[in-house]
Image (tube, rainbow, N blue to C red):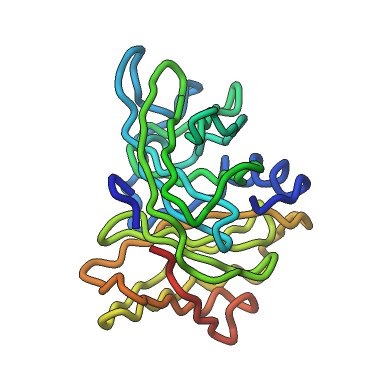
Amino acid sequence: MTTSRLLSVAALVAAGMLALAGCAANTPAPAASGDAPASSGVVQPGQELEVDAAWLAGGTAIALVTSGSSTCVPTASEATVQADGTLAVTLTDIEGQACTRDLVPRASFVALPEGVDPTRELDIVVTYADATGDTDLDGYSGGPVEEFTPSAGWVDDDQLVLLTFGSSSCAPVVENVEVAGAAVTVTFVAPAADQVCTMDMAPRLTLVTAPEAEDDNATLTLAGGGAEFATPVTIPIAD
């Protein structure tokens, strides 16, 4: 688990940058209060950026969690390993995109570059607009994750982030979350019969609030959402 809290596939990274701008879901999400063609972030010049992180995809990727518009999730335009082993990530908004004025946690997908050893503690410095923040992750202790399959990691004591792959325009939407000890079950909303989805295969991040879940050896069961999880899938939650 983070103490504050890639998939190395080039095609996915490009698709993911577009997918995450409009398809990350939060649980729960406050109501929007209007649109604005401004930055999706709420940081001011010189302000410290509050950021958390979680391991994903068997230690080949991470999620960075910041606060801002629910409809405009920043993307990782650059991720490099510094001489001291620190991971430096630059988050950017999609230029000209209109964003709701709500303030919620959003998760940005970051495919880790070569040079990151996931078994060691990872220090992360994030730059977003004119703000900079930092966080760190304990070394990843979970097992490998098969390509294009779901994975999940703890952000903090009661929030986790889920990574799935599919259409960038039709991300899963959480309907219900149940917690029983270390077992978390998420049921997704069934899509409308006439829903039209793009045919891409993109990484999609969903933030899930799971209060009072036991995070040691925790599991996440995914159910519902139409055909995607018609047969429930259970995966470990990385800490």
State left or right for residue 69 relative to residue 167. left
Q: Which residue lies furthest to the left in this view?
A: 212
Q: Residue, x 38% and y 63% (percent of image)?
A: 239
- Vertical position of residue 74 compared to residue 147: above or below: above
Q: Residue at x 43, y 53 (%)?
A: 54
179, above or below 31, in the image: below
Horizontal and vertical percent position of residue 120: 46, 52
The quadrant of the rendering that contains the N terminus is bottom left
Residue 191 is left or right of residue 55, and the answer is right
Please determine whether, in this image, residue 66 is positioned above or below residue 182: above
Residue 46 locus on image (x, y percent): 33, 13
Q: Residue furthest top?
A: 45
The percent coordinates of residue 55 (x first, y second) are 47, 56
**Percent coordinates x, y for residue 195 in the rendering:** 66, 63
Which residue is rendered at x = 46% and y = 25% of the image? Answer: 127
In the picture, residue 141 is in which quadrant?
A: bottom left
Q: Nearer the viewer, residue 173 or 106?
A: 106
Residue in view at x 44 percent, y 30 percent: 126
Q: Nearer the viewer, residue 102 or 213?
A: 213
Query: Which quarter of the figure has residue 150?
Result: bottom right
Q: Is residue 33 above or below residue 116?
A: above
Q: Foreground residue, 58 or 48?
A: 58
Left or right: 75 in relation to 28: right
Residue, far front:
84
Count of residue discs: 0
